């Protein structure tokens, strides 16, 4: 299948290395200029799709002029920052309080988000089964969704994933009619890979996973930067 290509990029683990905590990431000074060069090369068909809330990303990097989606795709914006569809829905603060209680009890980090909250247990990876079981029970009993990733588990309102974000962008200009490719490193990026494959493109996995629907791979964040010329 011919036609122009669109590029969708995850953030943590793809454009920046994963850090011990969400605020500990290092964003290279050259990244934003590199993304704008890519956007020009793809004639605007470039978007960032992250599990982070967009206001959180904005504390680390200025994405003005670039299409982006935060909150696992629940909050999609065009290059001008205008919303595409509904914004991310917040969850009951009591659910966040319960997650915070678990985090304090076990000495791990709670990340509050506009659309939910996440437990980060990179400092204590052995807590993974317990953290996931706790968050899963909380989500199931309150009609919420759960997202898991590398040393993180998150609860949020149902109805958002990175595949839906791809679909949202692909219905708007300049993405319409192009072949989408998604670059990501984690479980939540699999929805993006699948959506792109369904629309004539595919996925590029960063790092290693035992099971993935991505057709191609890159070794690490540095490999992503080299491949994209960032």
Image (tube, helix red, strand yellow):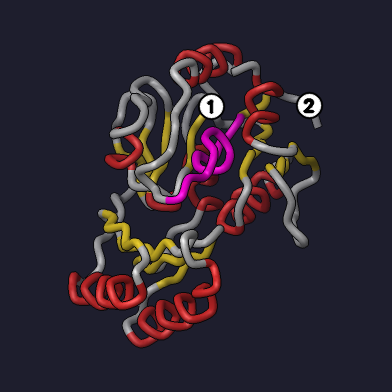
Going from N to C along the chain, the mark reached first, 2 or 1, is 2
Quarter of the rendering occupied by the C terminus: top right
Query: Could you tell me which residue is drawn at 48 percent across and 15 percent down?
Result: 30
Cβ atoms at labels 2 and 1 below 8 Å apart: no
Q: Quadrant of the rendered structure where residue 178 is?
A: top right
Residue position marked by numbered label 1 in the rendering = 46
Query: Does 17 appear in magenta?
Result: yes
Q: Which mark is residue 90?
A: none
Residue 219, image x and y in percent?
A: 74, 38
For mark 1, give the secondary structure: strand
In this picture, residue 213 sits left or right of residue 51 = right
Depth check, mark 2 against mark 1: the one in front is 1
For mark 2, give the secondary structure: loop
Residue position marked by numbered label 2 in the rendering = 2
155 up-or-down from 170: above or below = below
Query: Could you tell me which residue is drawn at 30 percent across and 30 percent down?
Result: 81
Provide the major secondary structure of the magenta segment. loop
Residue 2, image x and y in percent?
A: 78, 26
Residue 186, image x and y in percent?
A: 60, 53
Quarter of the rendering occupied by the N terminus: top right
In this picture, residue 120 sits left or right of residue 205 = left
In this picture, residue 61 sits left or right of residue 165 = left
Q: Quadrant of the rendered structure where residue 215 is?
A: top right
Q: Which residues are magenta?
A: 7-20
Q: Quadrant of the rendered structure where residue 143 is?
A: bottom left
Residue 217, image x and y in percent?
A: 77, 40
In this picture, residue 52 sits left or right of residue 89 = right
How much space separates mark 2 and mark 1, taking CA atoms?
18 Å
Query: Does 141 appear in magenta?
Result: no
160 up-or-down from 33: above or below = below
């Amino acid at each position: 299948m011919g036609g122009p290509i669109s590029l969708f990029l995850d953030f943590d683990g793809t454009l920046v290395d994963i850090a011990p905590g969400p605020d500990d990431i290092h964003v290279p000074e050259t990244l934003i200029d590199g993304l704008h060069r890519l956007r020009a090369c793809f004639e605007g068909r470039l978007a960032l799709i992250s599990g982070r809330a967009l206001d959180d990303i904005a504390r680390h990097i200025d994405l003005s002029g670039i299409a982006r989606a935060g909150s696992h795709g629940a909050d999609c914006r065009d290059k001008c920052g205008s919303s595409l569809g509904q914004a991310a829905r917040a969850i009951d603060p009591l659910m966040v309080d319960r997650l915070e209680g678990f985090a304090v009890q076990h000495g791990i980090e709670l990340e509050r988000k506009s659309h939910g909250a996440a437990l980060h247990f990179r400092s204590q990876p052995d807590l993974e089964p317990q953290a996931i079981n706790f968050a899963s029970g909380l989500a199931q009993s309150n009609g919420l969704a759960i997202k898991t990733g590398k040393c993180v588990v998150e609860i949020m309102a149902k109805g958002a994933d990175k595949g839906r974000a791809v679909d949202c962008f692909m219905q708007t200009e300049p993405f319409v009619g192009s072949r989408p490719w998604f670059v990501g490193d984690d479980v939540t990026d699999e929805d993006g890979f699948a959506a792109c494959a369904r629309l004539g493109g595919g996925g590029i996995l960063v790092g290693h996973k035992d099971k993935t629907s991505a057709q191609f791979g890159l070794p690490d964040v540095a490999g992503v930067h080299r491949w994209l010329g960032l």
